Amino acid sequence: MKKIITIFMAAVITVSAAWLALRPDVRFIATAAVESAFASEKLPEKTGITARKYTLDELSEREDVEFNDDLILVNTSHTLENTYIPTLVDYKETGILLTENFSEAFTKLNTETKNSCGEGLYFSSGYRSFAEQEQVYSEEGSDTAQLPGASEHMTGLAADVYVNGFAGKSIIKSPTGRYVNNNCCKFGFVIRYPFGKKSVTGISYEPWHLRYVGLPHSEIITKNGLTLEEYVDLFEYGEWYSYGEYVISRQQGDELFVPETFSECSISPDNCGGYFVTAHR
Ligand SMILES: [Zn+2]
């Protein structure tokens, strides 16, 4: 009896191993899910800094402070008005519209991808206006499309990408797609809808949907296995947090604190009624 159980167990292990070996995408998802569940990189820690208070008008006049929307949270609970129109650029004159920060970071990501994998990424979708999203929603329905106002594509900070011959979920069947999923956080991007997080994001696994959030946020989110929803919630309003060479603060009101000294500083609304101030020391 003992021998039969041993043989049976060995067979199960062999079949599972062979199956994982034959399906690199399944193996990739399994590895990513395990890594995400046990991810415990250092989170930003509360810190005290010398900061000064400015009105939003004063800050918008400062040339050393960048205003962007990089950290806005967009989902069915935090939607955008149909009047929301981001400032966009035409990515390398492809007709794909994205924010400037997305475009610049994507150029770097794609260059590294080409150098490492011998091929780059293509876009299937970038910015979509409220009206275009309305049309997508009416054509595809709620199974695959987001309600107008709840789609990240309206921000110009999100794009759907594919690798030659591997679109949609099959992107991770290609080594290039897996490389991009593993490395995009170095350039400010996150896989916005990770595997196993539908209960948080409301959206199933989308290894093709890149969202730009900027550094160091993309690295903190990815290395800790978080979603943007969970990340935004980490920060108590009014506190300062340090992470590597960065300090981050989430604040509310028409007056915001900004560090007295910094090399770079950016401010983004969170689409929850507050702002993120991110400064590189
Ligand atoms: Zn998408």
Image (spheres, rainbow, N blue to C red):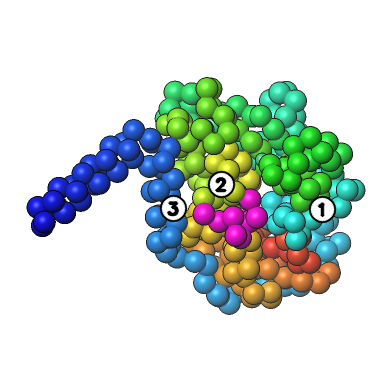
Query: Label 1 crowding class (10 Å Cα cut-off): few <14, some 14-19, many 20+?
Result: many
Q: Can residue 157 be seen in this view?
A: no
Looking at the image, residue 274 sits to the left or right of residue 186; the answer is right
Which residue is the extreme one toward the front?
1
Give the amino acid type for the residue marked by disc 2 in the picture. Answer: Tyr
Label whose residue precedes the other's in the sequence (1 or 2): 1
Residue 89 drawn above or below residue 37: above
- Give coordinates of residue 218: x percent, y percent: 56, 52
Give the amino acid type for the residue marked by disc 1 in the picture. Answer: Leu
Q: Mark 1 points at which residue?
A: 80
- Viewer-nearest of discs 1 and 2: 2
Q: Name the residue under label 2.
A: 205
Query: How far apart are the alpha carbons under marks 3 and 2?
Result: 11 Å
Q: Quadrant of the C terminus?
A: bottom right
Residue at 69% over, 25% down: 92
Residue at 44% over, 53% down: 33
| Segment colored magenta | 196-203
- Give coordinates of residue 190: x percent, y percent: 57, 48
Q: Mark 3 points at which residue?
A: 33
Could you tell me which secondary element the residue under label 2 belongs to?
loop
Q: How many labels does the image show?
A: 3
Give the amino acid type for the residue marked by disc 3 in the picture. Answer: Ala
Q: Quadrant of residue 258?
A: bottom right
